[in-house]
Image (tube, grey):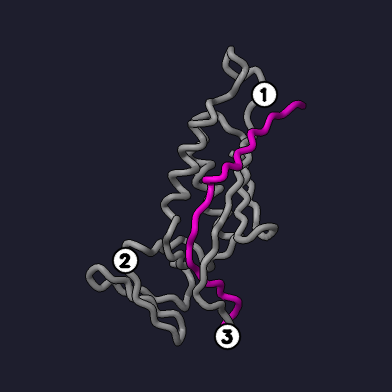
Amino acid sequence: METTTLHLHKQNFKFSSAHFLIFNKQSAERLHGHNYQVKVDILVPSEAEFSKEGYFVDFNVFKKIIKAKLDEWDEMVLLPAWHEDMGFTENGPSLEVRFRDRFYVFPKNEVQRLPVTNTSVEQLSRLLASHFAQAFKPYGVQKVQVFVEETRGQGACTGIDI
């Protein structure tokens, strides 16, 4: 069986965010940031599904969806909403965050509370893959694979069959 995969890895498929990784009950990283880079592979149907011009979908359709999602996380503090040791209190325009013996206050509009237990690249790639799978489904995409690199040569990849 023949398959075709579209590879999208643009220089602007990036986001810069702060986070900290939680290792166990005693250990967690300090708050720090990364310049994340994202690559997206899209498995498309057989050539019979291509347009009469010989292509599946204009790359710009997918690029706009990818870039819009990454922009939501750009220049934000990413926090795990589902970790048992995280506590959040909204106080006017501020978000008070308690994590064990730590206390932070951030502007509320500069924080993304993600539906995860940790802000690892594994979890970030899973969230993005899930979002893109739903967004690409109406176009007939068969599978999406998302690679999130936190530093050059270090990241995680999640694939989802649609």
Looking at this view, name the residue that lies furthest to the right. Answer: 1
Look at the picture and state if 6 lies above or below 128: above
**Which residue is located at x 36 percent, y 63 percent?**
110
Magenta residue check for 11: yes
The residue closer to the viewer here, 90 or 6, is: 6
**Which residue is located at x 56 percent, y 75 percent?**
22
Q: Which residue is mark 1?
A: 46
Type of residue at label 3?
Gln
Type of residue at label 1?
Ser
Look at the picture and state if 109 lies above or below 57: below
Does the image show residue 160?
no
Q: Tell me which segment is drawn in magenta.
A: 1-26
The residue closer to the viewer here, 41 or 107, is: 107
**Which residue is located at x 63 percent, y 50 percent?**
147
Type of residue at label 2?
Lys
Q: Percent from the top left, x then y, of residue 66? A: 50, 42
User: Helix or strand or loop: what does disc 2 sit on?
Assistant: helix
**Which residue is located at x 54 percent, y 59 percent?**
35
Quadrant into which the C terminus falls: top right
Residue contact between numbered discs 3 and 1, judged by CB atoms under 8 Å: no
State the image quarter where residue 112 is shown.
Answer: bottom left
User: Between disc 1 and disc 2, whose residue precedes?
Assistant: 1
Q: Which residue is mark 2?
A: 108
For the residues labelled 1 and 2, the Cα–Cα distance comes to: 46 Å
Describe residue 2's horizontal placement relative to residue 95 as left or right. right
Look at the picture and state if 99 lies above or below 146: below
User: Helix or strand or loop: what does disc 1 sit on?
Assistant: loop
Q: Which residue is mark 3?
A: 26
For the residues labelled 3 and 1, the Cα–Cα distance comes to: 51 Å
User: Helix or strand or loop: what does disc 3 sit on?
Assistant: loop
User: Between disc 3 and disc 1, whose residue precedes?
Assistant: 3
